[in-house]
Amino acid sequence: GQQVMQIPQYQHVQEGEDFTTYCNSSTTLSNIQWYKQRPGGHPVFLIQLVKSGEVKKQKRLTFQFGEAKKNSSLHITATQTTDVGTYFCAGEGGSEKLVFGKGTKLTVNP
Amino acid sequence: DTGVSQDPRHKITKRGQNVTFRCDPISEHNRLYWYRQTLGQGPEFLTYFQNEAQLEKSRLLSDRFSAERPKGSFSTLEIQRTEQGDSAMYLCASSWGQGGITAKNIQYFGAGTRLSVL
């Protein structure tokens, strides 16, 4: 079945440093979604990418969808302590369900 | 706020007991999903409904698990004869989805029900 791999599993950064997490699917995706889960919280939708090669920005966050629609990345510029949490990618393939990666847990040292 | 609500937030039970969780989705959403999340893992798909029809169940879902969405609104997830391995956070999500339209199906999650089986 469809698998979604995400790396790294953990990332510790100093405040102000950049952060990137990568996501790879075993199959071509119809779309990919990114979620953020704060400690003790639930996943909160960030963005959806649908088109091959698509790039979207949200303030300091940049999301990319690969040309083959099998990989994606999230890049945060100049991290802040409010960026702390686990970032999940979730791919939608042939069926109308999301397959989540294991997430990248980001900690930010002030 | 009319987001996704789940009840109860926490459930502690003894092994072998049955438990039932409820999810109330966002009212205009036609799809409802159940996930299970354990520590350090992403949400794992269990099952989903479009309106009242259960369209897919994970092969990981044993016969002890059953879900219903009788009127296409709220849903219940029941676990019979609970085992310690069932301890997890059970998340519900809802979305508005239309088949063949990929730029949809953004899922909104509830706060979850944390199950502890002793």
Image: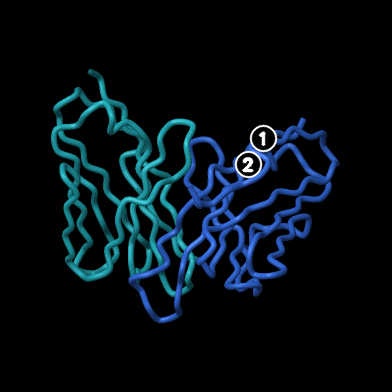
Neighbour tally class for label 2: few under 14, some 14-19, many 20 plus, Cα within 10 Å: many
Q: Which mark is residue B113?
A: 2
Residue B82 lies left or right of residue B55; in this view the side is: right
Please tell me whether residue B3 is drawn above or below residue B100 in the rendered image: above
Determine the CA span between mark 1 and mark 2: 5 Å
Tell me the SS state at disc 2.
strand
Picture coordinates of residue A31, whole percent (x, y): 33, 67
Residue B12 lies left or right of residue B110; in this view the side is: right
Q: Colour of chain A?
A: cyan
Picture coordinates of residue A12, whole percent (x, y): 27, 27
Q: Which mark is residue B89?
A: none
Report the quarter where the C terminus of chain A lies.
Answer: top left
Question: Going from the N terminus, do you reach mark 1 or mark 2 first?
Answer: 1
Residue drawn at point x = 74 percent, y = 56 percent: B65
Q: Which residue reaches farthest bottom?
A: B100
Residue position marked by numbered label 1 in the rendering? B10
Chain letter of mark 2 equals B
Q: Colour of chain B?
A: blue
Neighbour tally class for label 1: few under 14, some 14-19, many 20 plus, Cα within 10 Å: some
**Residue type at numbered disc 1:** His
**Residue type at numbered disc 2:** Thr
